Amino acid sequence: MRAVITVIGKDTVGILAKVSTLCAEYHANVIEVTQSVLQDMFAMIMLVDISQLNANFNQLVDHMTTLGENLGLKVHVMHEDIFNSMHRI
Amino acid sequence: MLNVQDILETISMIQEENLDIRTVTMGISLLDCIGSDIKTACQKVYDKITFRAQNLVKSCEEIEKQYGIPIINKRISVTPIAIVSAACGQNPVPFAQTLEKAANACGVNFIGGYSALVQKGFSAGDEALIRSIPEALAVTDHVCSSVNIGSTKTGINLDACGMMGQIVRETAERTADRDCIGCAKLVVFCNAPEDNPFMAGAFHGVGEPDCIINVGVSGPGVVRAALAKAPDANITEVADMIKKTAFKITRMGMLVGTRASEMLGVPFGIVDLSLAPTPAVGDSVAHILEEIGLESCGAHGTTAALALLNDAVKKGGVMASSQVGGLSGAFIPVTEDAGMIDAARCGALSIEKLEAMTAVCSVGLDMIVVPGDTPAETISAIIADEAAIGMVNFKTTAVRLIPAIGKGLGEELSFGGLLGGGPVMKVNSYSPSKFIARGGQIPAPLQSLKN
């Protein structure tokens, strides 16, 4: 089971560190990261393995959303199935 | 690795273009609750609904979290109550109150099925139920009612059309203090589908299993945004873009439906391939038509553009799901669509044009506010006209009119929420009363003889 974490917003110091620290707290293993900074807009997409989570997936979602709010960023955590079903035949 | 472009597209569809699952509707059969004692029967109905749907809202909320996709409404549809209440032989309003109580206990947004199927005549219980609709809708908030008065196979029950004109008026009068909201929960069908997840017309058909999950998707904003990216495309390319978008929307509906059915341990029924608008800006079917190239919805060309839209939505959708049903098509409820409301206000959209549009799209004359002094016979005749379109074209048509009691042209009603609000629209004032008073059955058309 994998989930996609997307982070979009104004670039500041330590975004990647904070998001991946939170992943580590929940035992979500980061598999792949792509990120780009266009002017001062930061966009990061992270694929994480959630099969070994030490808590409920919903708690991770809530925690990430709160983290995003605190940093002034939009953070979405979504199960990868939604992308597979919408974009693959 | 997933494609970055795809991920960002999905997120912007949900965040900016109002992509959502309009409804997850649980269909529940009440056939095993039938009994001659109304108290016992109501208790059985309450117990069955609250048992079957106890986790519906909770499971849907979990799915919303997991996939990051909003599920706007959670609903329940039940066996047409006229069938359940017939054995009691008395006023069926207690069933409506029971449904309301059960809906509140389960936390759902609507419960549908206070219904009767009278396309060929009234059986025991049907007439009592129809006569009780105004009271039932006045004393409840979440109960929705529907009556099927015609079908391609049977023709149109003109007696029922005549009766429904009066019932619609009476329902408006009973709820006049609340912007006549009762009528927003009452729909008159021709060729009603048995697996429709959308309100107000949802009921659980007798051929359906004991319990089932049906899903209705939405996403007019997504289609409009896709078209906006290619302003100079020709109309074939436009159809293609709509198809691709509908595919994605429907796949999402499939995913949510399958997941909900797994979580609830209930079989998955159908995805309704629908484009259902809301009054929110950016979630309008009328705006898609305008994006295709009309100055305003209702202009000449609207019917053709809508036919293309409706067809492309279905073509994209059937590729995405093998279990398709319900109403499936683009909806055009006037008060629930920001673009339609504007078009009606400025006079670009008339009831006559809407009637033509219903011949090529899903459902029918939906959520239209008419003057408060519109006679019952005129409402009956509008119902008969719309049913004739459905009967001849082998499609579902419906009428959901709201007579604005005490109001006339230039005034508006406001329901709030998904039901929206809108201006009173002009109705032809010449009388059809003799036609309606004839009663009887309009014979089934030649199209019904397919064997």
Image: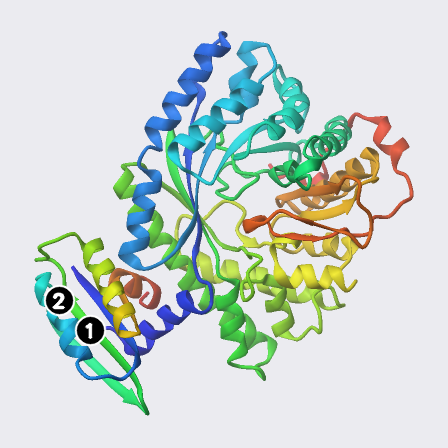
Q: Secondary structure at mark 1?
A: strand
Looking at marks 2 and 1 on the same chain, the residue that comes earlier in the sequence is marked by 2
Which sits in the foreground, B302 or B25?
B25
Observer-nearest of A85 and A47: A47
* View extreme (bottom): residue: A39
| Image spot of residue B163 (x, y percent) | 75, 27
Q: Give the residue at x 61% y 44%.
A: B396
Q: Chain of mark 1?
A: A
Mark 2 touches mark 1? (CB < 8 Å): yes
- Location of residue B350 with respect to B266 vertically, above or below: below
Look at the image and tell me whether residue B118 can be seen: no
Task: Kindly identify the residue that appears in the image at 20 percent across and 78 percent down.
Answer: A15
Give the x, y percent position of residue B216: 46, 49
Q: Disc 2 residue type?
A: Cys
Q: Chain of mark 2?
A: A
Q: Which mark is residue A23?
A: 2
Q: What is the quadrant of the N terminus of chain B in the image? A: bottom left
Q: Nearer the viewer, residue B344 or B396?
A: B344
